[in-house]
Image (cartoon, helix red, strand yellow):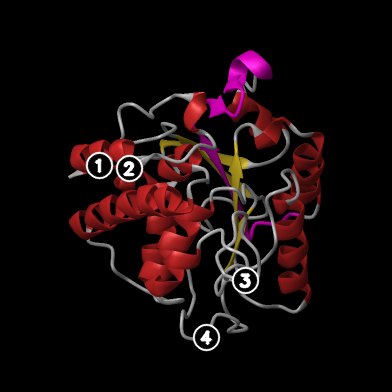
Amino acid sequence: MQNCCDINALKQKALLVRQEILELTNMAGSGHPGGSLSAVEILVALYDCQLRHDPKNPRWPGRDMVIISKGHVSPVVYSVLANAGYFSKDEYKKYRKLGGILQGHVTTKTPGVEFNTGSLGHGLAVANGLAIGAKLLKKDQKMYCLMGDGEIQEGSVWEAAMSAAQFKLDNVCAIVDYNKVQENGMVNDIMNLEPLKAKWESFGWVVAEIDGNKIEEVLKAYQDFGKINAGKPYVIIANTIKGKGVSFMELKSAWHGKAPNNEQLAAALKELS
């Protein structure tokens, strides 16, 4: 477990992760930068300050577990894991390459990845199953599940939401990266999610709604998990910006699954720095 909760250090880490997201997708010539950039603070705060984990022993039995249900945002996942010490950044050269451990959608070939995801709508059910298992074994483990807002248009997510409440899974923390944009347009034009907070509450969850790109608010939401949700599952609705940090990518569905070329990469890195 890490305790590096210096806010300025976390903001610098977030900047580094954003740069690496852009570099990874540029090197591969493909990938998903938009939703990776929106989720940076969510995962940096989780791995640096909240999660009980051991990068030197990724399968440590006492670890908390993270299910990346929106598994296409592998660039942010791999950057956070590499910076935490799970594997060498030399692996970046083989991102999305045949035989490499860093595939386009996250898989268990990558140290620190708990479940193969990318086909959306499954992660919360997986987190529920792990949480039930931990309770049966009387293990003090927490399960985190990162989902996209387009993803939660799927019915399987709401079946899992009902199940978590039914089984009183207060060791489950769902996180919705609510960046308002999915592959083909604005989320609420395609399938309106509102009133999203009221929906989760009506399904029996304790809800924290925050600015998911403000590290202080993300940390507070994580710190409340396990303290204010006795007997109930906990969900963080993290309002974020798709493509956060790069002006020409922000809130643009075109950058859901398109890599920057060399000129765009240079412009984006200049803007970030």
Q: Quadrant of residue 168?
A: bottom right
Q: Which mark is residue 99?
A: 3
Residue found at x 30% / y 28% = 247
State yes or no: discs 3 and 4 in contact (Cβ < 8 Å). no
C-alpha distance separating marks 1 and 3: 29 Å
Instruction: List the residue tagged with mark 2.
Output: 262
Q: What kind of residue is marked 3?
A: Gly
Q: Which mark is residue 266?
A: 1
- The answer to whether residue 245 is seen in the rendering is no
Q: What kind of residue is marked 2?
A: Asn
Residue 206 coordinates in the image, percent (x, y) = 59, 42
State yes or no: discs 2 and 1 in contact (Cβ < 8 Å). yes
Which image quarter is the N terminus in?
Answer: bottom left
Which image quarter is the C terminus in?
Answer: top left
Which of disc 3 and disc 1 is earlier in sequence? Answer: 3
Instruction: List the residue tagged with mark 4.
Output: 57
SS of the residue under disc 1: helix
Rate crowding at label 1 as few (under 14), some (14 to 19) or many (20 or more) other CA atoms within 10 Å: some
C-alpha distance separating marks 4 and 1: 36 Å
- The answer to whether residue 92 is seen in the rendering is yes
SS of the residue under disc 4: loop
Residue 33 coordinates in the image, percent (x, y) = 46, 42
Which of disc 4 and disc 3 is earlier in sequence? Answer: 4
